[in-house]
Image (tube, helix red, strand yellow):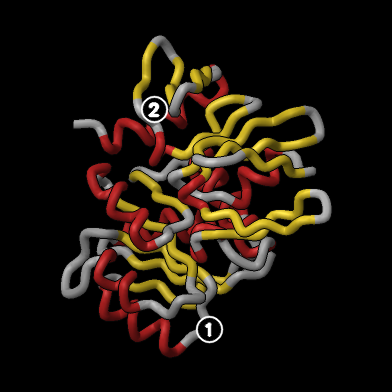
Amino acid sequence: MKLNCIITDDEPNAVSLLEVLICQTTDWQIVAKCFNGLEALQAVKQHKTDLIFLDINMPLLDGMSLAALLPAGIKIVFTTAYSEFAADSYNYSAIDYLLKPITLKRFLDAQKKIEAAFENGKSVVDNGYFFAKTGKTIKKVPIHDILYAESEKEYVKLVLEKENILLYRRLKEIEEMLALPFLRIHHSFIINLDHLQQIQDNHVYIGDKRIPISDKYNEAFWEVINRKKI
């Protein structure tokens, strides 16, 4: 997939690492490398930009402030060494949040989310809703109302606050459509972290549903949870 991207970080080593990861694993074009927020803001005006990697702690203009100034069509991936900013990143509909130092595995996971967002024409979180065809009916589904998604053979059941919706989709397709706070924790489940009530005995509780955390997704799950833990 061809994407034009900008890397923004006040640490040259961090810029170089992202440049290597992008050049070695993607077909994306790096149109600018910026070392503060003001440089990035100028670069966005000069180049057609699809995607921007934003460090949060930067001089002159920090990443969060810059994100608020970007045109709506530019998708954002935040990068930082500080996990406490993760919650704030959700306010900007970021596709992902990469904790430094960024590993190859973690970057490849982010790449899948990024390209899926562009293949779908948008990240559904950007709009706050999507339309789902169920039988002869097309329903508007508010993203926040989804508690979790459960795989049922060739279908996916979306469990909402007031109803369930059955989609003729694979859970993998739903996973690629939904960015954080949605997180896959099991072969059969994607949960909405905004509705998570408690974690106990390697299970999460959402409403009256007890959902297991599988070994395959355990590390990624706790990486996200630990960012918000006090």
Q: In this view, does 33 lie to the left or right of 12?
A: right
Name the secondary structure under disc 1.
loop
Residue 134 x %, y %: 76, 49
Q: In this view, does 167 lie to the left or right of 6?
A: right
The C terminus is located in which quarter?
Answer: top left
Task: Give the camera-side residue of 128 and 66.
Answer: 128
Q: Any mark on residue 222, and which?
A: 2
Residue 113 x %, y %: 57, 51
Q: What residue type is labelled 2?
A: Trp
Q: Residue at x 57, y 45 (%)?
A: 108
Q: In this view, does 48 lie to the left or right of 151?
A: left
Position of residue 93 relative to residue 59, above or below, is above
Task: Give the camera-side residue of 77 and 27.
Answer: 77
Q: Which of marks 2 and 1 is in front?
A: 2
Neighbourhood count class around disc 1 (C-alpha, 10 Å): few under 14, some 14–19, many 20 upward: some
Q: Any mark on residue 48, and which?
A: 1
Residue 130 x %, y %: 61, 59
Q: Residue at x 82, y 55 (%)?
A: 136
Q: Residue furthest front?
A: 162
Asked if one can make out residue 193 in the rendered structure from this viewpoint, the answer is yes
Q: Is residue 47 left or right of residue 141?
A: left
